Amino acid sequence: MNPILFVAISISFFCTFLAMPFWIRKAKEYGLEGIDKHKTSSKKIAESGGIMVIFGFVLGVLVYIGTKTFYLGEKGIFENIFAILCVILLASLVGIMDDFFGWKKGLSRRSRIILIVFSAIPLMVINAGESTMMGINFGLFYPLVLIPIGILGATTTFNFLAGYNGLEAGQGIIILSALSIVTYLTGNSWLSVIGMCMVASLFAFYIFNKHPARVFPGDVLTYSVGALIACMAILGNIEKIAIFFFIPYLMEVSLKLRGRLKKQSFAK
């Protein structure tokens, strides 16, 4: 990787860092606030700060594409990168809808599933990843069935372990950093840059989201990070490693299923 590519990662960090105070101010101004259910204080906190994380991430990725095109002279179509951006933006749109409707009402479970599966279409249409896993060639079953399941599974389950200040951003930083290392070692350095752009944005967000939080991430962040994890696993052909990283989330799914996906996990 050319060192100049790290400019894109820096752009993601500083764009999110500089935009977050503006979002916090505007969210409070328009009443987009919530109460921290894990604290005794009734102070209202700005919500849906993940929007600025997506803003910084997308801008960093576009700078990365521009750098490779104009500075390094690579004239590729970058269809995989644009497919990732489409998936992230569609997933974040679902998260925004969920955030604005409120966590008590939100989207219905059926609507959420349909919309998240819809966000997997960009990877499906480019036939992303390798259809052969564990010696089995899944053929068209892979892009038409396994990819939507992967996007749906990672997006929804990443949202399960959430709530404490800095938890969602911290988990995203850890998992995406690990996946970026794996993709770099397996010869997919371009995926590493994409992953680190999101890590940089999450680091900037964490500064405002750590205890005591000044802003909450919202589903727009958790859905987007989960979707990116799935995209990196699929395009980097590291599905088994991603599943291993997701063991805590699979355990949480079993606990949620025990409560029929209705019980909340708020402190008392």
Image (cartoon, rainbow, N blue to C red):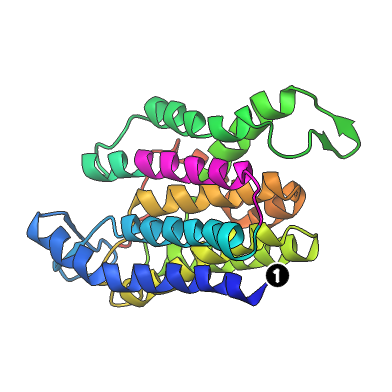
Q: Is 215 contained in the magenta span?
A: no
Q: In what quadrant of the picture does the C terminus appear?
A: bottom left
In front of the other: 223 or 120: 120
Q: In what quadrant of the picture does the N terminus appear?
A: bottom right
In front of the other: 8 or 255: 8
Which residue is painted at 48% across and 40% down in the image?
86
* Main SS category, magenta section: helix
Q: Is residue 160 visible?
A: no
Residue 235 percent across, percent down from the top left? 69, 46
Q: Which residues are magenta?
A: 74-94
Q: Quadrant of residue 65?
A: bottom right
Which residue is painted at 32% across and 55% down in the image?
51
Q: Is residue 254 visible?
A: yes
Which residue is painted at 54% across and 29% down in the image?
121
Which residue is painted at 68% across and 37% down in the image?
128
* Amino acid type indicated by mark 1: Met
Count of marks overlaid on the render: 1
Q: Secondary structure at mark 1?
A: loop
Q: Which residue is tagged 1?
A: 1
Residue 55 percent across, percent down from the top left? 36, 57
Residue 174 against residue 95 in the figure, above or below: below
